[in-house]
Amino acid sequence: MDITGTFQYEEDAISAAQGLHAAGIKNVSLMSPIPMHAAEKALGLGKSNVRKFTLIGAILGGLGGFSMCVATALVFIMPTGGRAIIALPPYLLITYETTILIGVLSTLAGFFLVAKLPAWKNRPYRVEANVNRFVVAVESPSSNEVKKAEQIIRGAGALGIEQTGDTL
């Protein structure tokens, strides 16, 4: 079962989210027709973990690209005009390109993992959130959290509260 509350004003939706977060209710999400920068603070969200995927991917890509160049030069030794077998300037180009390539691909993979995509189950959604309303949703609250969540949402000034999903 999911509980959704529809609000006319952004401040009311933010206050409902803050109240739900303060009450210890998990799986709260906000839907809005406009960007809401206060939502991250209201829900207690920190910085995204996607940047860690990017850093790790870029480091592994750089090390992998440089290692590939060195390994290739050592396997296929071709001394040319007294130059060193392992020369840094040409290898740095390939190292740079593999750093960018693997960094971007790991960022994409990190985004999908952090965003929990693809969505394997239906999440609460209200069409009004795309037009002119703000929606606060609580996904799968426990039986003792249902009344508390409804009270907090109603107390914040919800226009309407709806329970969706199975009621087992």
Image (cartoon, grey):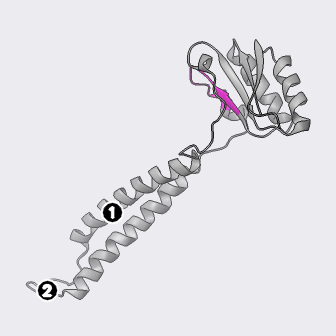
Amino acid type at mark 2: Met
Q: Secondary structure at mark 1?
A: helix
Q: CA distance from mark 2 to mark 1?
A: 23 Å
Identify the residue position indicated by label 1 in the image: 98
Instruction: Work out whether mark 2 precedes mark 1 in sequence or the reverse, and give the earlier one.
Output: 2
Quadrant position of the N terminus in the picture: top right
Give the image quarter of residue 30. top right
Quadrant position of the C terminus in the picture: top right
Magenta extent: 29-39
Residue at 73%, 24% (x, y): give it.
14
Identify the residue position indicated by label 2 in the image: 78
Residue situated in front as seen by the camera: 161 or 114: 161
Residue situated in front as seen by the camera: 79 or 98: 98
Q: Answer with left or right where residue 49 lies relative to residue 7.
A: left
Q: Position of residue 11 (x, y in %)?
A: 72, 17
Give the image quarter of residue 156. top right
Residue situated in front as seen by the camera: 145 or 165: 165
